[in-house]
Amino acid sequence: MVDEEVWNAEEICCHPNINTETLQILRTDFQKIIKATKNLIEVKKLPFLEE
């Protein structure tokens, strides 16, 4: 499941398995990766959690 805001963001930042590095990926590249791996995802508007 991917949040709609994340799916539509221009760039996505994430930690690749460890918290010592951050990847910055363009939306189009992220979507290509998802399609290439044939992972099934749902894009949903997830609720915002306030602290």
Image (cartoon, rainbow, N blue to C red):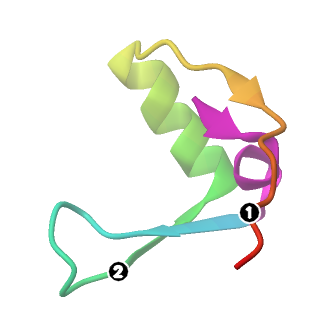
Q: How many marks?
A: 2
* Disc ID at residue 22: 2
Q: Nearer the viewer, residue 33 or 18?
A: 18
Measure the C-alpha gap from mark 1 to mark 2: 23 Å
Mark positioned earlier in the residue sequence (1 or 2)? 2
> Which range of residues does the magenta coloring cover?
1-10
Q: Nearer the viewer, residue 36 or 45?
A: 45
The stretch drawn in magenta includes residue 5: yes
Residue 17 as seen in the image, left or right of residue 23: left
Q: Which mark's residue is nearer the viewer, 1 or 2? A: 1
The percent position of residue 15, horizontal first and vertical second, equals 32, 70
* Disc ID at residue 41: none
Q: Residue at x 74, y 63 (%)?
A: 49
State the SS at label 1: loop
Q: Is residue 51 above or below residue 38?
A: below
Q: Residue at x 66, y 67 (%)?
A: 11
Image quarter where the C terminus lies is: bottom right
The percent position of residue 30, horizontal first and vertical second, equals 54, 46
Q: Nearer the viewer, residue 16 or 26?
A: 16
Residue where numbered disc 1 is placed: 49
The crowd level at tag 2 (other Cα within 10 Å; few <14, some 14-19, many 20+) is few
Q: Is residue 6 above or below residue 51?
A: above
Q: Residue at x 77, y 72 (%)?
A: 50
Using the rendered view, name the quadrant where residue 21 is placed.
bottom left
Q: Nearer the viewer, residue 22 or 45?
A: 45
